[in-house]
Image: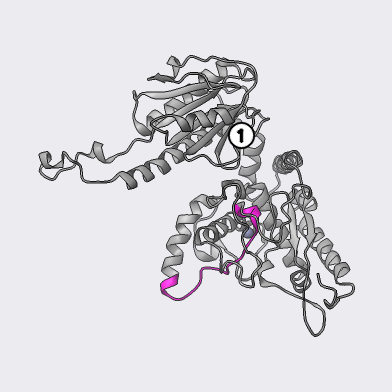
Amino acid sequence: MTADRPRAPGYEDAVRARIAAARLWAAHRAPYLASAVFALNTVILEPALDEDTGAPVADPGFRAFPADTRWNLYVEPGTALATPVEEAGWWMLHQVGHLVRGHAARSPVRPEPGHEVSTARLPAAGAVRDEEAHRWNQAADAEINDDLEAEELRGPVGVVSPAELGLPAHRTAEEYVPMLDVLASAMGRGGRALAEAIDCGSGVDGQERTYEDGGPGEGLTRLDRELLERSIAAGIQDRISARGELPSGWRRWAEERLRPSVNWRARLGAVIRRGLSTVAGQVDFSYRRPSRRAGAYAGIVPPSMVRAVPDTVLVIDTSGSVTKDVLSRLLAEVTGIIDGVAGPGRRLRAFCCDVHPHPVQVVRRASDIELVGGGGTDMRAGIATAMALRPRPDLVVVLTDGETPWPEQRPPAQVVVCLIGDGGHAPGWASVARIPQGMPAKGET
Ligand SMILES: [Zn+2]
């Protein structure tokens, strides 16, 4: 913002008019997402201006109208003025898809606190981005573009299209990642690119960009987002009951959003299994060495010695707001899942935590764990205690209602948080499964 910078009078009004028209177009084309489209908070960035004419110039790095998780939509003036209304409206629906499906929270490249801000404002977005971040963006795009295509909302040239790439429909971003890897290496050999390197912003991967001001002030709060998502999900359900046609991805999302109990058991199993297998991969890799006993087997390595079993510790919040009955049933579920992966009957370490951690119990079954404690919770102490155990655990599973402070830094172990009830929160560095307060017994939902 220097004094001698050329001025482009009136560009801001023209940009606002373009965005307003795009919003109306988007709300009209996908009425069940109208409230979401109107909730997007547009942030108009400083334009890059042409040195001779003083008019805003489009920065191709902003083609996607990137968003962040606070529902800010970043509008680069040159790009907005160069993009037709329908295309800008399509990008709004696309970004709503990223935000509502929680792509940033699901992102494998989500950074640790205190990370470096990425340098996304570069002409070729994606050129400097890490390969994994770029692939995740494409996979997340595949997940949502699929549903847009089902509504006859075809994206602009160069965006990822599962149909055009010959990929199966209705998959999740997590499922598309390995498919795109295979496809990219096959296409790479033929010298063709999979799709344009489009950067959808921190709303897709949780990595803050330089053009975000980083302040929590702008955009939607966590509560705003929660209420908004529920109302969108309710709107989708209404439309379904009125026999309206709706893309299957949105239908599935609304179902899960409104009735989390349907899927919490599957989600719990998925996050714990993923935690265990990530750890097992690391352990297996770093500790692989010839067995000292191998000689005795004449070159045959016993398979049981190859498989590393991750060491898991359970941290149980006994602050009093969660009933012991719910904790016991959840413990049985969690240990059942761990047994299923790592084999039954192994010794397991567990400890209860309220404002202070209680002594570690070593048990074989969930029912052997004695639940002690009450009062407030401080999971900072709980996580610190888990990390101080020797041997240090590879995986920490925390059972809590989330009404607790958490450590700011990611601890040096995988952490899975079983978050009981609707309130509370888990830190960004943990994998989370939300468990309904009532915790229906097995067989019910
Ligand atoms: Zn995208």
Task: Specify the quarter for ligand 1.
Answer: bottom right
Quarter of the C terminus within the rendering:
top right
Q: Is residue 410 left or right of residue 345?
A: right
Which range of residues does the magenta coloring cover? 188-205
Residue 44 in which image quadrant: bottom right
The image shows residue 268 at horizontal and vertical percentages of 51, 33
The image shows residue 336 at horizontal and vertical percentages of 42, 26
Q: Which residue is mark 1?
A: 406
Quarter of the N terminus within the rendering:
bottom right
Other-residue count near label 1 (Cα within 10 Å), few / some / many at <14 / 14–19 / ≥20: some
Residue 183 in which image quadrant: bottom left
Q: Is residue 312 above or below residue 241?
A: above
The image shows residue 261 at horizontal and vertical percentages of 60, 30
* Between 124 and 90, the one nearer to me in the picture: 124
Q: Is residue 390 above or below residue 43?
A: above
Circle count = 1
Could you tell me if residue 144 is visible in this image?
yes
